[in-house]
Image (spheres, rainbow, N blue to C red):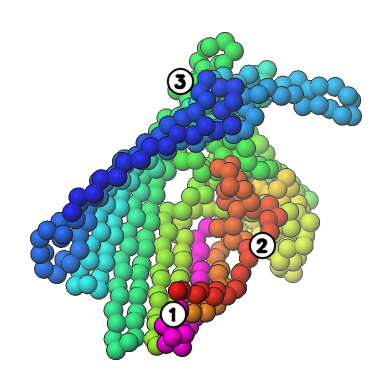
Amino acid sequence: MLYLTVTGRNDWASQLAGSSQSSFFYPSGGLSWVPTALWDMGALSYLKIRGSVASVGMPFPRFLTIPTYEYDATNKIWKDKTHYPIGDLKPERTLTYEVGLETSLWQDLSINLSWYLADTYNQTFDPSLPPSSTYTTIYLQTGSVRNTGVEASVGYGHTWNGFTWNSSVTLTWNRNEITELAANAVNPVTGEPLNLDKLDIKGLGRVKYVLKKGGTLGDLYTTSDLKFNMNGYIEADDSGQVTVVDDGMDRYLGSVFPKYNMSWRNEFSWKGIRLGFLFGGRIGGICYSATQANLDLYGVSKATADARLAGGVLINGREMIDAQKWYQAIGAQSGLPQYYIYDATNFRLQELTVGYAFPARWFRNMCRLTVSAVGNNLWMIWCKAPFDPEAVASTGNNYQGIDYFMMPSLRSMGFNIKLDF
């Protein structure tokens, strides 16, 4: 009824060459208790309570410990370094605590609940520095990010005269928060405190990620906006031209992270025939489409066509201005983000399977053959954004939720042949 699992792992990563550490070790431990293995608990046919502590390590990006210079082939010169000299780098670490329970009621109903808290530190950032600095960027390993979340699933399964139905609903919620930023960051050259209250991370065009204490790793900001008058109305000159200004003030656009995710899976089987489908949903978060901005800029989008047919764009609720002037203003430089931010909520038919398990007696009970057709991402039921918010152009943290002429989201279909002996 009591299970203990302990693991230990040591990695010798090539990225660490040249740093003070040649390897890193990370352990984990988990304990689970199954009281129903000892006592009859009535309708509660199965109960497991579990808890675990795990440390995970990950090396920093490659080549950071080896100073390099960029060569200008045109002028045949080596360019000056724009990064601060890199200090002593350490592997990134994540410490996770998790507790949960699994239970079955009346043999048919199952419930699985988990709560976790994960702290990540020694993260490597490459923020931009103020123009007054000799260098433009600096690699920093600082801060602490906390992810707190809940995962819950409820399942039901039963068989009636050879017909079986299994269904489950899953809900996941995660909160990402920067608990510490760069309070202890120092200049690797002088050793003096940098006193950074925020880190500006790379973005696209007029949109960027800004890391602040109390915020998230997915917070999008911009310093640009249209010019407004003292009454709060958009300013337009006599020719109908509006002006974009950049005053250096951070304007919060939202977080690219979802509020929660959910899914609903169903599986049916009868006399060897099998049918299964999975609906998935993402609720909350924002996304930004630079693709839409560029299409508007050149007047080849549906929005610009509709505006031309309408005789222009209505601003301030009372004034009509030329569509070309409006979209060339808000669509330039990958777009004014306020006008190209979309709700990332979406629901889709994520998977559909249809198959047949041939009777084992057809093969003299020596094997079992199952043939099935599988489709993924078949139907986007609801999506406000002009692209698939779940499709990303990069797996890094600095390009999530941003679309810049990405490949379209793909639908895939195929088949499986499974042979069991």
The answer to whether any part of residue 28 appears in the image is: yes
The earlier-in-sequence mark between 3 and 2 is 3
Give the residue displayed 59% in from the left and 61% down from the top. Answer: 388
Q: Which residue is tagged 2?
A: 408
Above or below, 64 against 354 in this view is above
Boundaries of the magenta span = 343-368
Residue 252 position, x and y percent, is 52, 42
> Which element carries disc 3, helix, strand or loop?
loop
Above or below, 88 against 410 in this view is above
Give the residue displayed 53% in from the left and 53% down from the top. Answer: 286
Q: Which residue is tagged 1?
A: 366
In which image quadrant can residue 71 be found? top right
In which image quadrant can residue 324 be found? bottom right
Give the residue displayed 28% in from the left and 56% down from the top. Answer: 113
Residue 83 position, x and y percent, is 66, 23
> Which element carries disc 1, helix, strand or loop?
loop
